[in-house]
């Protein structure tokens, strides 16, 4: 990318809508309610032949530093310092407000090049607001409609004029994200079933951090990366957008996704919270590892278990972080109890990694990342067909499938068809008659025999085509 653009302005002028327009996807949450955006979000953007990074920011508000609006303003000031160019956005429909004049002075003092964007220019009466915008002394206002995509050619020309052609143009970089397809066996196809390649610890990894509101998700990410990147505080439900943060850990590139707290459906009434939770679910589908942050003072509530079950059903690799461990009086007793509850309440991924951490003090973060790497290795694990069928011989000798309706079920062979998570195909005589209890037995035996704790295992039952099916029986 050649340069970085920060979109600045007071609340509800259409900054996130403009961000989505430049990115080409609806990443940032958009609503008529002022102050939807709270954290700053960075993403690759494109404006015709210009390629750059764009930063979506919270609405600039004049408030005390200790308040939530004040902390949001501090994040926006960081975005101004990081940016090479500022899109100062106003609402042309409502005209200039006192806050616009105050924040224009802040932007002017930064010394950065500024493009004055007059958004909502398609509205009736917007011409008066555009004429008022000249009073800010930030140059000619560029009339645009972020919602309808009007005025983008003029915005492109203004960017080139502000930065110069040499700075504005650069090489394009591809930033493509893929979502795992939902099939019977979720995961990546295996080309050679007999190969067992070694784990590649240089590949980038995507990690989502999820949990109930006020469990400490944003604080945990800030503690991991060592900076106040995400907005935190004692208020529950601060995070709304799913924010991605790039981080290098021991030379490996990681992308951390902070998500909004997920409450029970019955308690979610506001449209904005519904959108926030949907954005968090999307982050889970994009992720490889999902860290489930539980409040150690009130762990394993019903919502925690539902979140964990959702992650396992999506085929992601879960790791549990028991946060706020510094508030526990009797840690040894509670640790034994939590381990027992983890095994009993989450049998879908037996042996799940669980680590005690304190995001506030930084305790246990290295252990958490070690658990993440171990789980990721298991999630990528592959077993050759030869080993699987030798294992199957022992299983059938020890505990063969039961007889259904007086007919014995036959299992012919097993092979691994997918990884991420491990997915196996079992060739048998009557897949529809195979009891689920026996499928669970095979899954648990696979987990123990090939050391695959803590990740979902998929088993698909198949049968070979019968060449005599449909033919009349000879007399």
Image (cartoon, helix red, strand yellow):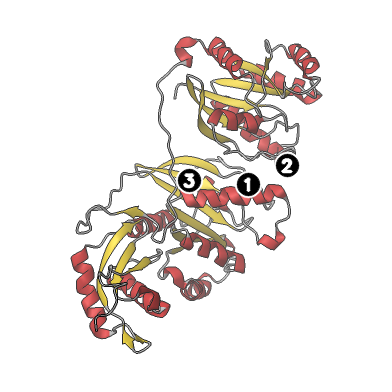
Residue 396 location, x and y as percent? 25, 81
Q: Which residue is mark 2?
A: 67
The residue depicted at 42 percent of the width and 37 percent of the height is 176
Numbered mark located on residue 239 in the image: 1
- Badge 2 marks a residue whose secondary structure is loop
The residue depicted at 36 percent of the width and 56 percent of the height is 420
Q: Tell me which label, 1 or 3, sits earlier in the chain.
A: 1
Q: Which quarter shows the N terminus? A: top left
- Badge 3 marks a residue whose secondary structure is strand
Q: Nearer the viewer, residue 466 or 200?
A: 466
| CB under 8 Å between discs 1 and 2 | no
Quarter of the image where one finds residue 393: bottom left
Q: CA distance from mark 2 to mark 3?
A: 26 Å
In the visual, does 395 lie left or right of 333?
left
| CB under 8 Å between discs 1 and 3 | no
Q: Which quarter shows the C terminus? A: bottom left
Q: CA distance from mark 1 to mark 2?
A: 15 Å
């Amino acid at each position: 990318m050649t340069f970085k653009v920060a979109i600045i302005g007071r609340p509800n002028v259409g900054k996130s809508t403009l961000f989505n327009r430049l990115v080409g996807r609806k990443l940032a949450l958009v609503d008529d309610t002022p102050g939807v955006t709270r954290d700053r979000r960075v993403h690759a953007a494109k404006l015709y032949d210009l390629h750059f990074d764009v930063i979506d920011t919270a609405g600039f508000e004049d408030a005390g530093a200790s308040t939530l609006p004040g902390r949001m303003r501090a994040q926006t000031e960081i975005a101004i310092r990081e940016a090479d160019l500022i899109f100062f956005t106003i609402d042309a429909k409502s005209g200039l407000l006192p806050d616009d004049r105050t924040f224009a002075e802040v932007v002017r003092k930064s010394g950065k090049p500024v493009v004055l964007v007059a958004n909502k220019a398609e509205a009736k009466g917007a011409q008066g607001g555009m004429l008022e915008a000249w009073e800010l002394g930030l140059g000619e206002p560029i009339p645009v409609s972020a919602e309808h995509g009007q005025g983008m050619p003029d915005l492109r020309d203004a960017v080139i004029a502000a930065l110069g052609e040499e700075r504005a143009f650069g090489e394009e970089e591809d930033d493509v994200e893929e979502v795992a397809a939902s099939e019977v066996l979720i995961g990546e196809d295996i080309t050679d079933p007999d190969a067992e390649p070694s784990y590649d610890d240089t590949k980038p990894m995507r990690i989502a951090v999820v949990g109930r509101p006020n469990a400490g998700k944003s604080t945990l990410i800030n503690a991991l990366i060592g900076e106040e990147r995400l907005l935190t505080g004692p208020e529950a439900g601060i995070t709304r957008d799913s924010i991605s943060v790039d981080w290098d850990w021991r030379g490996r590139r990681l992308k951390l996704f902070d998500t909004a707290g997920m409450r029970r459906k019955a308690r979610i009434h506001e449209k904005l919270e519904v959108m926030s939770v949907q954005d968090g679910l999307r982050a889970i589908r994009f992720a490889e590892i999902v860290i489930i942050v539980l409040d150690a003072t009130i762990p394993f509530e019903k919502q925690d278990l539902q979140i964990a079950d959702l992650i396992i059903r999506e085929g992601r690799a879960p790791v549990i972080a028991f946060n706020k461990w510094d508030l526990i009086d009797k840690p040894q007793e509670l640790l034994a109890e939590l381990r027992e509850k983890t095994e009993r309440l989450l049998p879908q991924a037996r042996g799940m990694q669980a680590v005690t951490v304190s995001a506030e003090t930084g305790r246990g973060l290295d252990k958490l990342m070690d658990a993440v790497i171990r789980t990721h290795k298991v999630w990528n694990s592959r077993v050759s067909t030869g080993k699987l069928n030798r294992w199957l011989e022992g299983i059938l000798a020890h505990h063969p499938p039961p007889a259904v309706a007086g007919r014995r079920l036959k299992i012919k062979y097993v092979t691994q068809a997918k990884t991420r998570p491990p997915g196996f195909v079992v060739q048998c005589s009557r897949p529809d008659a195979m009891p689920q209890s026996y499928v669970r037995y095979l899954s648990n035996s696979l987990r123990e025999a090939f050391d695959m704790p803590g990740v979902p295992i998929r088993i698909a039952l198949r049968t070979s085509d019968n060449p005599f099916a449909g033919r009349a029986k000879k007399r």
